[in-house]
Amino acid sequence: DAGVIQSPRHEVTEMGQEVTLRCKPISGHDYLFWYRQTMMRGLELLIYFNNNVPIDDSGMPEDRFSAKMPNASFSTLKIQPSEPRDSAVYFCASRNTRGGEQYFGPGTRLTVT
Amino acid sequence: AQTVTQSQPEMSVQEAETVTLSCTYDTSESDYYLFWYKQPPSRQMILVIRQEAYKQQNATENRFSVNFQKAAKSFSLKISDSQLGDAAMYFCAYRSEYGGSQGNLIFGKGTKLSVKP
């Protein structure tokens, strides 16, 4: 199994630009999670999906952030417009209903200048 | 709401020695899962070990074992025969079995482990 796949691995952009992060979960997993990690705030859950439906988006910082899961094998996290305080590592993770383990992708390091 | 506390921001161990990382949690639920994740400098989050709350037996994975004390709400990780590759940030995490939070992992703030050669 290829594991959770994220792209890009690194993204550098200027303030005000749109950023799109991508995630492919492990095949057969029906839960997908987006996290953000910073030194100040640690790991934060942004949003998670079950069977492609958003279940809890209370962690999404503000309207500039949006996430979609159009099918079981693909999800995006979009920031528009981006701001320097959005600089962080963004992780995607997935798991299946029957299992307890959550598997993480390698993360996307986002830098907004 | 559930919380996870790791009271040791940093720990250090000599290579080949044993180290224990502490984790406590707060919950009113009886069924849940507990996990330890490792995050090396590569920043990849790696699952180390899991424990189901209904199991009395402590989980073990090679050199990694846990001491699960359900009544005390304690879940410590013991690393035996420490190796240089064990140097990383370690996160304790909780997952409920119930309700709307069923999908979510709640993480502690982490313990940074250094291994001295």
Image (spheres, rainbow, N blue to C red):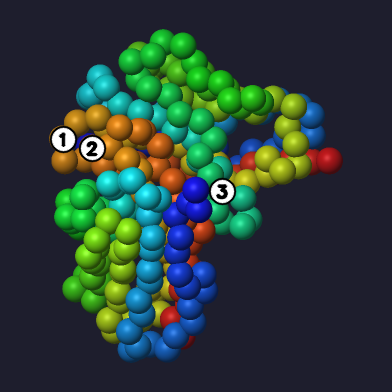
Q: Count all numbered tags in the image, as a single digit.
A: 3
In the rendered image of this protein, does residue A107 appear above or below residue B3? below
Check contact, mark 3 vs mark 2: CB within 8 A. Answer: no
Percent position (x, y) of residue B93? 41, 37
The answer to whether marks 2 and 1 sit on the same chain is: yes
- Horizontal relation, residue A7 to residue B115: left or right: left
B45 or B116, which is in the foreground? B45
- Looking at the rendered structure, the kind of residue marked 2 is Gln
Question: What is the chain letter for disc 1?
Answer: B
User: Is there any visible trace of residue A60 in the rendered image?
Assistant: no
A64 or B52, which is in the foreground? B52
- Horizontal relation, residue B4 to residue B27: left or right: right
**Mark 3 neighbour density, 10 Å: few (under 14) some (14–19) many (20 or more):** some
- Looking at the rendered structure, the kind of residue marked 1 is Gly
Q: Which residue is mark 3?
A: B39
B116 or A69, which is in the foreground? A69
Percent position (x, y) of residue B117? 84, 41
Q: Residue at x 44, y 85 (%)?
A: A13
**Mark 1 neighbour density, 10 Å: few (under 14) some (14–19) many (20 or more):** few
Percent position (x, y) of residue B75? 46, 24
- Horizontal relation, residue A35 to residue B77: left or right: left
Instruction: State the mark number for residue B99.
Output: 1
- Secondary element at tag 3: strand
- Secondary element at tag 1: loop
Check contact, mark 2 vs mark 1: CB within 8 A. Answer: yes
Query: Marks 3 and 2, how far apart in space?
Result: 24 Å
Percent position (x, y) of residue A26? 40, 50
- Secondary element at tag 2: loop
In the rendered image of this protein, does residue B17 appear above or below residue A46? above
Q: Which residue is mark 2?
A: B102
